[in-house]
Structure formats: C-alpha cells, structure tokens
Amino acid sequence: MKKLQEYSKQFQDEMNWQIKTDDYERTKASLLNNYMLLTTEVAEIAEELRKAFNNTNTAINNGIDEDKAFEMAKASIKEDLGKELADCLAYMTKFANYFEIDLEDSFYNKMDEVKKRKNKDVGLVNK
C-alpha cells in the first residue's frame, strides 16, 4: 500500500491533480470537489453491481441456472468494476496523501479495532 500511495502522489503531481493548497478557500473547494468525484465513482460501482443483477435475472428468465447466470454476470462486469474500484482507490489515496495518513497502517489498525468490538455484527458482513 505504501508503494501505491507513493505512485499515486507522483501520478497526481505529473497530472497536476493534487489537492490545491494555495489558501483555505481553494483547499476547501478542492477537497469538496475530490470528495464529490469519489462519491461519483462509488455510485459507478453500484451501477456495475446493478448490471450484474439485471444480467443475472435476464439469464435466469432465459432458462439458465441461477448460479451459472450469476457467474456469467460477474464475469461480464469484472473489468469495468475493477476500473471503478481503481478510481475509488485513486481518490482515497489522494485524500490519505493530503492528510499524511498511512493507509496500510490505518487499515490494519481499523481491522484490529473491529475484531475487538464487543457488539459485532459478524453475520451481517457476509449476508
């Protein structure tokens, strides 16, 4: 993840896509713009999932076994879903770099925190 964050920073610098830091108002506008772009990418993940479910239902209605239909639908969105996840990751690393957050450390710390929670919704994650 550290290499990914380093690459992301270099890429954003090359493309001049950094979060602007000239003054508070420009920084605030840049952060909000990037947040909106991130949420747009998250919505595009939902769109890919919707496509998979619609394709699955169409295949089932055409007589294909449910499990096979879903496997086919997953395969049909895999590339585009990967691109949308990558877009999200690009914006997430941009935020992490701006705020000087080590995503790898944050991830593992958060997962440890979740493991230690007393009120775990263990079954809900896999549903």
Image (cartoon, rainbow, N blue to C red):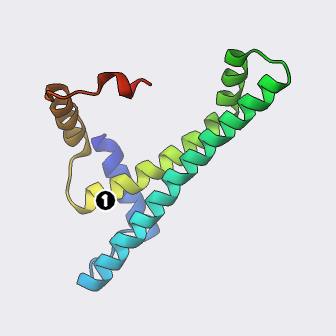
The correct choice, above or below, for 117 with respect to 104 in the image is above
User: Residue 82's quadrant in the figure?
Assistant: top right
The residue at the point 28 percent across, 27 percent down is: 121
Residue type of the residue flagged with mark 1: Phe
Residue 94's x, y, as percent? 34, 58
- The residue at which mark 1 appears reads as 95
**Numbered circles on residues, count:** 1
Q: Is residue 38 left or right of residue 111?
A: right
- Between 127 and 78, the residue placed more toward the observer is 127
User: Residue 49's quadrant in the figure?
Assistant: top right
The residue at the point 36 percent across, 68 percent down is: 18
- Between 4 and 70, the residue placed more toward the observer is 70
Residue 86's x, y, as percent? 49, 46
The correct choice, above or below, for 104 with respect to 70 in the image is below
Residue 25's x, y, as percent? 28, 85
The residue at the point 44 percent across, 58 percent down is: 38
The residue at the point 32 percent across, 49 percent down is: 5
Pointer 1 local density, CA inside 10 Å: few below 14, some 14–19, many at least 20: some
User: Residue 1's quadrant in the figure?
Assistant: top left
**Helix, strand or loop under label 1:** helix
For the C terminus, the image quarter is top left
Residue 67's x, y, as percent? 67, 16
The correct choice, above or below, for 72 with respect to 78 in the image is above
- Between 127 and 5, the residue placed more toward the observer is 127
Q: Is residue 8 left or right of residue 49?
A: left
